[in-house]
């Protein structure tokens, strides 16, 4: 089943340390309301977008310039199925140098095609990771307006 988790990979010209800093600046690449710390091991932060999405992430691993891992400890998604589908899933960013570029490998472990939200959540992650995060890393500009706004 792990091969069915949502994953995405991209490369940028910035250093692993610059990428790491940008990922930890969640407010710089997510839209919606964020409360709590997003860059210290053990911190928890919540994300809310209107009445469509609420989730709480705990930062469970930080390896400077290499890895960031969040565990979803609470969620309420506006879906036909289980609104708590994300609870217990893990959001991972693996950062590694590749020649003169830095590769970012994103995975939402546990977000699988059987989930009611898989298509919508995958599209949202595509926007945030491949759009807003990549843009923040490359240009230092904040998130673009999501297509659903």
Image (tube, grey):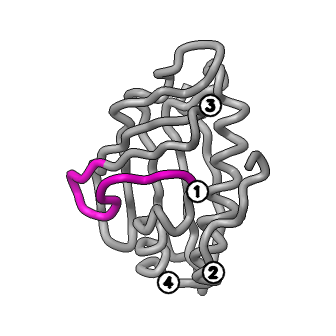
Q: Earlier in the sequence, mark 4 or mark 1?
A: 4
Q: Earlier in the sequence, mark 3 or mark 4?
A: 3
Q: Which residue is mark 1?
A: 31
Q: Which mark is residue 138?
A: 2
Q: Which residue is mark 3?
A: 4
Vertical arrangement, residue 112 with respect to residue 103, above or below: above
Measured in 3D between alpha carbons, the distance from the residue under mark 1 to the one under mark 2, in whole angstroms, is: 18 Å
Q: Are marks 3 and 4 in contact (CB under 8 Å)?
A: no
- Which of discs 3 and 2 lies nearer the camera? The answer is 2
Mainly helix, strand or loop, the magenta region? loop
Marked residue nearer the N-terminal end (4 or 2)? 4
In the image, which disc is placed on residue 15? 4
Pinpoint residue 99: horizontal percent, then vertical percent: 59, 82
Is residue 74 among what the camera can see? yes
Dividing the picture into quadrants, the one containing residue 14 is bottom right
The region drawn magenta spans 32-44
User: Quick one: label 2, few (<14), some, or many (20+) residues within 10 Å?
Assistant: some
The secondary element bearing badge 1 is classed as loop
Mark 1 vs 2, N-terminal side? 1
For the point 53% across and 14% down, the residue is 82
Other residues around mark 3 within 10 Å, as few (<14) / some (14–19) / many (≥20): few
């Amino acid at each position: 089943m792990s091969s069915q988790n949502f994953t995405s990979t991209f490369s940028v010209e910035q250093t692993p340390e610059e990428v790491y800093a940008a990922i930890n600046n969640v407010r710089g690449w997510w839209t919606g309301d964020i409360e709590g710390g997003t860059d210290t091991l053990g911190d928890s932060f919540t994300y809310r977008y209107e009445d469509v999405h609420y989730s709480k992430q705990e930062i469970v691993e930080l390896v400077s310039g290499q890895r960031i891992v969040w565990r979803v400890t609470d969620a309420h998604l506006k879906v036909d199925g289980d609104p708590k589908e994300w609870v217990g899933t893990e959001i991972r960013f693996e950062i590694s140098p590749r020649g003169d570029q830095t590769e970012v490998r994103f995975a939402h472990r546990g977000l699988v095609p059987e989930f009611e939200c898989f298509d919508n959540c995958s599209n949202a992650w595509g926007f945030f990771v491949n759009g807003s995060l990549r843009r923040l890393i490359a240009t230092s500009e904040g998130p673009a307006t999501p297509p659903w706004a």
